[in-house]
Image (cartoon, rainbow, N blue to C red):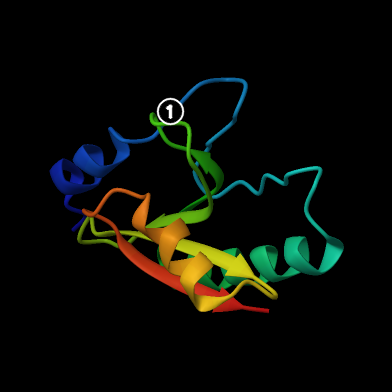
Amino acid sequence: MKNYSRSNYLKSFIEFNSLTGNKSNMFCINKNESKEHRNKKFEICCELIDNGFEAFTEVIFKDKSRADIVCFDNKGNGKIIEIAKSEKEKSIKNKLNKYNIEFDLEFIKR
C-alpha cells in the first residue's frame, strides 16, 4: 500500500503546472540535453516504472531548481536522480546539495 501522506508531502516541493508537465510516468525532455543524456534518462525511467516506482522527469522545484528524474516508491519515499557525463565530484555535490534534504539523492554517470 502506498504511503500517500509521505509522497504528497515530498511532492509539495515540486512546482506542478501545465507548462512544465510533471505528469506521473510520462517522459519529458529538455531541448538542451544530448541524445545520449536523453536516452539514459529514458532507460532509467523505464526501469523505475517496471519496478513499481512513480517517476517524473525534468522536475522543477518551487525554488526553481531542476532535476532530471524524481521518483517515489510504494512507501512514499522520494529520490532525486541526476545524470551527468563529465562533471567533477565537487560540482556534483554542489548540485545535489541544492535539493531538498528530505529526498534521497543519486548521481549516475553516463
Indicate left or right for 97 with 41 as reference: left
In the depicted structure, whether residue 81 falls above or below residue 25: below
At horizontal 35% and vertical 57% (from top left) the residue drawn is 97
Task: Name the one closer to the observer, 25 or 102.
Answer: 102
In the depicted structure, whether residue 27 falls above or below residue 8: below
Place residue 63 in its image quadrant.
Answer: top left
Q: Which residue is mark 1?
A: 15
Which quadrant of the rendered structure holds the C terminus?
bottom right
Q: Secondary structure at mark 1?
A: loop
Residue type at tag 1: Glu
- Residue 24, how many percent across, how many down? 49, 43
Task: Name the one closer to the observer, 2 or 48.
Answer: 48
Task: Name the one closer to the observer, 108 or 75.
Answer: 108
Residue furthest to the right in view is: 35
Place residue 14 in its image quadrant.
Answer: top left
At horizontal 42% and vertical 71% (from top left) the residue drawn is 106
- Residue 25, how many percent across, how many down? 54, 50
Indicate left or right for 27 with 51 as reference: right
- Residue 100, how many percent across, how many down? 29, 48
At horizontal 59% and vertical 70% (from top left) the residue drawn is 44
Q: How many marks?
A: 1
